[in-house]
Image (cartoon, rainbow, N blue to C red):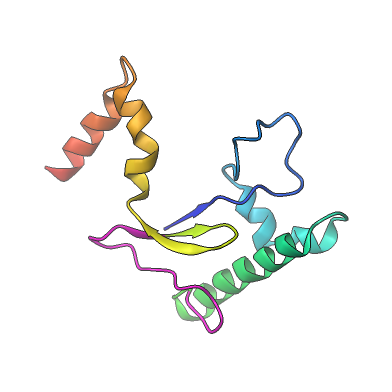
Amino acid sequence: MYEFQYRPSFSSDMKPKTVRGDHGDEIFSVLGAPFLKEGASDEEIKLSKMVMKFWASFARNGNPNGEGLPHWPAYDQKEGYLQIDVPTQAAQKLEGQGSVFLDQAPGHGGCQEATTARTH
């Protein structure tokens, strides 16, 4: 599992600065868009190369880990995942970070109920 947190250079100025990586933004890195777009930083190009290496390693071996790449932990009972950003690093328990707001919002017990149903 991964979370793409990098804010690409092509992000719209209309997108609030607090929003970093959006759903699907990683696809541009996977496909090498920073190599084709003027204005991409060296940082963004390096990130794109790294993401392409992860995907290529997974396609070749069924495992995204490879030489020279940050360790991508297997998702298991420890709920490890990879935060793709600068720097890219392993982390744990992604779901708990994003669902706290919804669990506490009035009328949105659905996330909490779904979590309870899944664990029982």
Image quadrant occupied by the C terminus: top left
Residue at 76% x, 33% y: name it: 13
| Left or right of 115, for residue 24 | right
Q: Nearer the viewer, residue 51 or 27?
A: 51
| Left or right of 20, for residue 74 | left
Residue at 39% x, 59% y: name it: 91
Residue 6, horizontal then vertical, whole percent: 61, 51
Name the main secondary structure of what is drawn in magenta: loop
Residue at 56% x, 50% y: name it: 5
Using the rendered view, name the quadrant where residue 55 is placed.
Answer: bottom right
Q: Nearer the viewer, residue 90 or 54?
A: 90
Tell me if residue 103 is in the magenta stretch. Answer: no
Above or below, comparing residue 102 to residue 88 in the picture: above
Above or below, comparing residue 87 to residue 3 in the picture: below
Above or below, comparing residue 68 to residue 17 in the picture: below
Residue at 29% x, 31% y: name it: 111
Image quadrant occupied by the N terminus: bottom left
Above or below, comparing residue 98 to residue 41 in the picture: above
| Left or right of 8, for residue 65 | left
| Residue furthest out toward the top | 106
Tell me if residue 72 is in the magenta stretch. Answer: yes
Range of magenta residues: 65-81
| Residue furthest out toward the bottom | 67
Residue 89, horizontal then vertical, whole percent: 48, 64
| Left or right of 95, for residue 34 | right
